[in-house]
Amino acid sequence: MIELEGVPELVDPVMVAAFEGWNDAGDAASTAVAHLEREWKGEVFAALDAEDYYDFQVNRPTVFMEAGVRKITWPTTRLSVVRVGGDKPRDLVLVRGIEPSMRWRSFCNELLGFAHELGIELVVILGALLGDTPHTRPVPISGTTSDADLARRMDLEETKYEGPTGIVGVLQEACTHAGVPAVSLWAAVPHYVSQPPNPKATLALLNRLEDLIDVRIPLGELPEDARAWQVGVDQLAAEDSEVAEYVQTLEEARDTAELPEASGEAIAREFERYLRRRDGSSGPSAGGHATADGGDGPSSYRRDTPGGRTRPPKPSQQDSDDEESSED
């Protein structure tokens, strides 16, 4: 039974979700939702029962002290609501948690129950996967959906992926079958620097989300963090000739692939974002308040591995463990 007594009627609500784990390389996706919660001061209004979905030997609870009393935080998925003010106010329902260990269909049905009760108009699921992409170039973001009409209206790719999937892919399909419009946004994280955090990928996801739902997102210190991250990786790459050579190979491949397109759409999107940020009247303002209490990308994307990758393979070789392509 879902009770939402503390949540008022929402305005044009969009659900934005991200889950730590398999589909969250560099913690880029979960950090993006955490950023929205922090900037808009979201307060949790609901949490799924951890006993139903998590194996505590895989995702351990944590003990902490509060006012001299020991307490336990259980791994779960929590929901919060924030209202973005401005000329066109809009509510966001933020879902952040850990990919469940079991009962995925029940997990998705419970989230969809909240979506129906709250009148959610669109579900946006954020994900990040490892890819053959250089850290020196803009982070590739792919938007996918299973809805052909939605793909045309929102300039997205209709997913054709077949293969192993994570909770992002399962939730997107559950939304589609339930008649709830759903989109997945995927960031490609360089596989040779997969350790979290990756503020550059998080920033790219938030920029694409901003374009998608027409909400001005306060970025805080993220742009500076992203620049600092790139400088740090530049320094590490410069200290290893093999890494530097590999990055150069990726840069050449990326630049060659993008040259024919002349990046027209990307330039137009950046200009629109600039105008939106310069003129607050062109979209909702950055302010907001609480109203209650880690794809289907390019085929070169790789599944994240538990230990991450610290060094690249040589350009002429690939580990057989990394032959899997991107997934939903």
Image: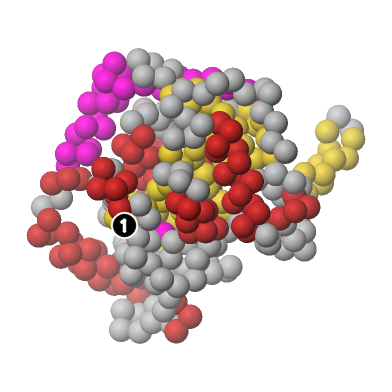
Q: Position of residue 245 (x, y in %)?
A: 29, 72
Tell me the residue that label 1 is attached to. 158
Task: Using the image, determine if residue 70 lies above or below residue 171.
Answer: above
Q: Crowding at label 1, few (<14), some or many (≥20) Cα neighbours within 10 Å? A: some
Q: Which residues are magenta?
A: 267-295
Q: Residue at x 60, y 38 (%)?
A: 114
**Count of numbered labels shown in the rendering:** 1
User: Quarter of the image holding residue 322?
Assistant: bottom left
Q: Residue at x 77, y 59 (%)?
A: 56
Front in this rendered view, residue 179 or 196: 179
Secondary structure at badge 1 equals: strand
Task: Using the image, determine if residue 11 lies above or below residue 66.
Answer: above
Q: Looking at the image, can residue 88 be seen?
A: yes
Q: Position of residue 183 (x, y in %)?
A: 40, 48
Front in this rendered view, residue 78 or 21: 78
Q: Residue at x 17, y 42 (%)?
A: 267
Q: Looking at the image, can residue 36 be seen?
A: no
User: Is the N terminus in the top left, top right, bottom left or bottom right quadrant?
Assistant: top right
Magenta span includes 32: no
Q: Residue at x 49, y 34 (%)?
A: 120
User: Is the C terminus in the top left, top right, bottom left or bottom right quadrant?
Assistant: bottom left
Task: Using the image, determine if residue 135 lies above or below residue 219.
Answer: below
Q: Amino acid at mark 1?
A: Glu
Q: Position of residue 258 (x, y in %)?
A: 17, 59
